[in-house]
Amino acid sequence: MDAPHDTTRINRLRQDFTGVESVWLFGYGSLIYKADFPYLERRRATIHGWSRRLWQGSHDHRGTFEHPGRVATLIPEEGAACVGMAYHVAPATFEHLDHREKNGYLRHEGVLDFGNGKSVAGLVYIAAQGNAAWLGPADDATLARHVAAASGPSGRNSDYVLHLARALRELGADDPHVFAVEARLRDLHGTG
């Protein structure tokens, strides 16, 4: 029996890949800097109408059931734009990705904007409010303290936030939320 936050089985029923040779996937968290899967192509992309927030719990990667870490999800926000990385992948890649993103994330369809008037339909994993691993909003200082204290099988939660912030800067993306939590983390660690 699956844990209540495990969305693997649900995701495998959400899209039918019969006859599909490749799919675009949008990554906005660790998928930006940790591509542990094969891909045909990788490009900077933007998804409109969404903002990145560290409001999702991580019981399986950056935390534990007793003390979940905080990882990125997307929340709907009119006029917002979230920069990330798009991957062109074979449908078989979702066997791995559905397991990696199982902690409350569901696959959704969206439009990935490559700039210069070019866009494609693609998929994005989103952990919506109310899922079993949802932690919700908090102020930057509270988020940073929570992140600083969490660790799981994939490492320290603070490493996740620091890697994400660095990857966003490398993409030329401005993310006030992630950068504010990063700054608070650096203050806590004395590396500001």
Image (tube, rainbow, N blue to C red):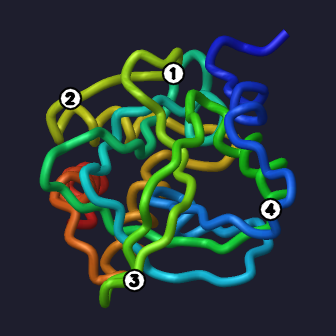
Task: Please state, as top left, top right, bottom left or bottom right, where the C terminus lies in the image.
Answer: bottom left
User: Depth-wise, is mark 4 or mark 2 nearer the camera?
Assistant: 4
Q: Is residue 192 above or below residue 148?
A: below
Gap between marks 4 and 1 measured at Cα: 31 Å
Identify which residue is drawn at 37% across, 73% down: 113
Sequence order check, earlier mark of 4 and 2: 4
Residue 40 as seen in the image, left or right of residue 4: right
Up-down relation of residue 154 to residue 141 (above or below) = below
Within the image, what quadrant is residue 98 found in?
top right
Q: Are marks 1 and 2 in contact (CB under 8 Å)?
A: no
Give the Cα distance between marks 3 and 1: 35 Å
Q: Secondary structure at mark 2?
A: loop
Please name the residue that numbered disc 4 is placed on: 20
Alpha-carbon distance for marks 1 and 2? 15 Å
Cα separation, mark 2 vs mark 3, equals 36 Å
Residue at 17% in and 41% down: 140
Mark 2 residue type: Ala
Question: Dot 3 corresponds to which residue?
Answer: 118
Query: Where does residue 109 sit, x and y in percent of width and height?
Result: 52, 48
Q: Nearer the viewer, mark 2 or mark 3?
A: 3
Labelled pair 3, 1 in contact (Cβ < 8 Å): no
Label 1 amino acid? Ala
Closest to the observer: 93 or 189? Answer: 93
Residue wearing tag 2? 138
Is disc 4 in contact with disc 2, using a CB cutoff of under 8 Å? Answer: no
Secondary structure at numbered mark 3? strand
Mark 4–mark 3 Cα distance, whole angstroms, equals 21 Å
**Left or right of residue 166: residue 93:** right
| Dot 4 alpha-carbon crowd within 10 angstroms: few under 14, some 14 to 19, many 20 or more | few
Query: Badge 1 is on which residue?
Result: 133
- Disc nearer the start of the sequence (3/1): 3
